[in-house]
Amino acid sequence: MGDLDFRGRQMPAWFPDAKFGVFVHWGAYSVPAWAEPTGELGAVDPEVWFAHNPYAEWYWNTSQIEGSPAHEHHRTVHGGLPYDTFLDAWKAELFDPAEWIDVFARAGARYVVVTTKHHDGIALWDAPGTGTRNTVRRGPHRDLVADLAAAVRARGLRFGVYYSGGLDWHAGRRAVIRHEDLIDECRPHDAAYAAYALRQVRDLIDRYRPDVLWNDIGWPDAGMADLPDLFAHYYATVPDGVVNDRWDGAHADYLTSEYQANRQNETAAHWEQCRGIGLSFGYNRNEGPEHLLDPAGAVRQLVDVASRGGNLLLNVGPKADGTLPGEQRTVLEGIASWMAGHGGAVYATRPLGPGAAPSDGAPWIRWTRDDRHAFAFLADVPDSARDQVVLKTRPGLLDPATAVRLDDLPVRADAVPDGILATSVALGTPLPTVLRFALL
Ligand SMILES: CC(=O)NC[C@H]1N[C@@H](C)[C@@H](O)[C@@H](O)[C@@H]1O
């Protein structure tokens, strides 16, 4: 990742301390809210990915692919109408930004990143150059970016903007049929689009002062020379802002992975894994419980990422009417109740590093640390273990006698040859139990 003139720029502590953010993908695509729940990015054959795209926010593209189920769905259910019809049908009549952010804050999110313009080219603010192709002039008739920025900041959370710099289906490109299309064929790279996109990102910076600048897919070739000034302007406007890595290699404060894709980025000094609660970022009416993380799964995703030094950006796909889908809200509320008693073992921690081994099976074990303590997260301890588990640690790392459970239930911890034998109750639950030890 080639740093431009920002060599040696320090990562603001708030970002790695935050550990947990909520992503919001909300757009005209939330009206059809239709995709095949095929599988996770990185686990589905790229050859079938685009025609059977589980990302409901890709509806315009998927429905253009002849022979795809989405194409058939669009023809039979929506009469093959132009995609922008969905913008006018998007009313957001029940949208209550403060209510959303209350759910996200209680779940323990420390930052919220919202789509401001996704690949469909429709802006959620009165973006320069979009004419009426935005939510202020049509559909919701609201500056949704401003509404969300205000609600996020009123709750003391950090606010970030997602912008699709690399793909804009209104910039006159054909549908993405296969992965290599994403490089050139289907992406706008011309000077006119580069000026258009630059003007919009500068507008986002100047209007909303976002704490996170989250670009996606890449940046137009003709606009790469604009980026040093853009980032300099951003940092001058938001000194402790952070920039992600999807600018075609121009610059990054941190690297990103997405579901199972780009996992190699999770070894960087600073990184963030993004994924939906289900298989899609935009709301997909075809997703059922079998496609979604359950609360324990979401908590363990967060703990696993935090234990390896990353942040989890977990996505919520609101419905077109502005309500949060019940099944997604349930997951967030499950995270909330666990984080209420255990967040202190996640926030502002760092990987414990060598000397204490995570597990890759049952029991599920992860570690974090702060300046004075090590935290062991245990889940799925088999019944046969009778609520005992050996935590593999090196001698002299931590003091077993100082073991306490963060939920105040009793625990016994004894030094054994390859670590610590912890004995307690209900270690077999899917939701992690957390033990705290003093570091020696
Ligand atoms: C790895 C990659 O380029 N992903 C693009 C992907 N990012 C997600 C956060 C969603 O916005 C998808 O719709 C988008 O295509």
Image: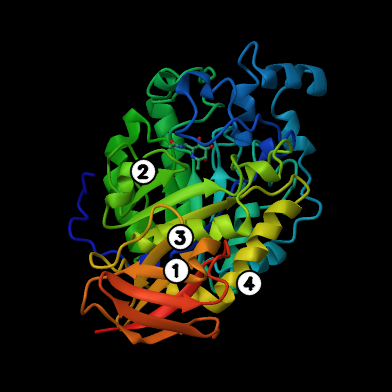
How many other residues sit within 10 Å of disc 2, few (<14), some (14-19) or many (≥20)? some
Q: Residue 263 — which label? A: 2
Residue drawn at (50%, 81%) of the image:
406
Vertical placement of 313 versus 43: above or below?
below
Vertical placement of 282 versus 342: above or below?
above
- Residue 143 screen position, x and y as percent: 65, 53
Q: Is residue 275 left or right of residue 335?
A: left
Kind of element beneath mark 2:
helix
Cα–Cα gap, marks 3 and 4: 22 Å
Kind of element beneath mark 3:
loop
Kind of element beneath mark 4:
helix
Residue drawn at (73%, 16%) of the image:
72
- Residue 309 screen position, x and y as percent: 34, 61
Cα–Cα gap, marks 2 and 1: 22 Å
Residue extending furthest top? 66
Q: Residue 337 — which label? A: 4
Cα–Cα gap, marks 4 and 2: 29 Å
Between disc 3 and disc 4, the foreground one is 3
Q: Is residue 407 left or right of residue 272?
A: right
Q: Is mark 2 within 8 Å of ligand 1?
A: no
**Residue type for callout 3:** Pro
The quarter of the displayed image where residue 14 is located: bottom left
Q: Which residue, given by chain and number where applicable, does mark 3 sit on?
A: 363
N-terminal of the pair, mark 4 or mark 2, is 2
N-terminal of the pair, mark 2 or mark 1, is 2
Between disc 2 and disc 3, the foreground one is 3
Residue drawn at (46%, 56%) of the image:
362
N-terminal of the pair, mark 1 or mark 4, is 4
N-terminal of the pair, mark 3 or mark 1, is 3
**Residue type for callout 1:** Phe
Cα–Cα gap, marks 3 and 1: 10 Å
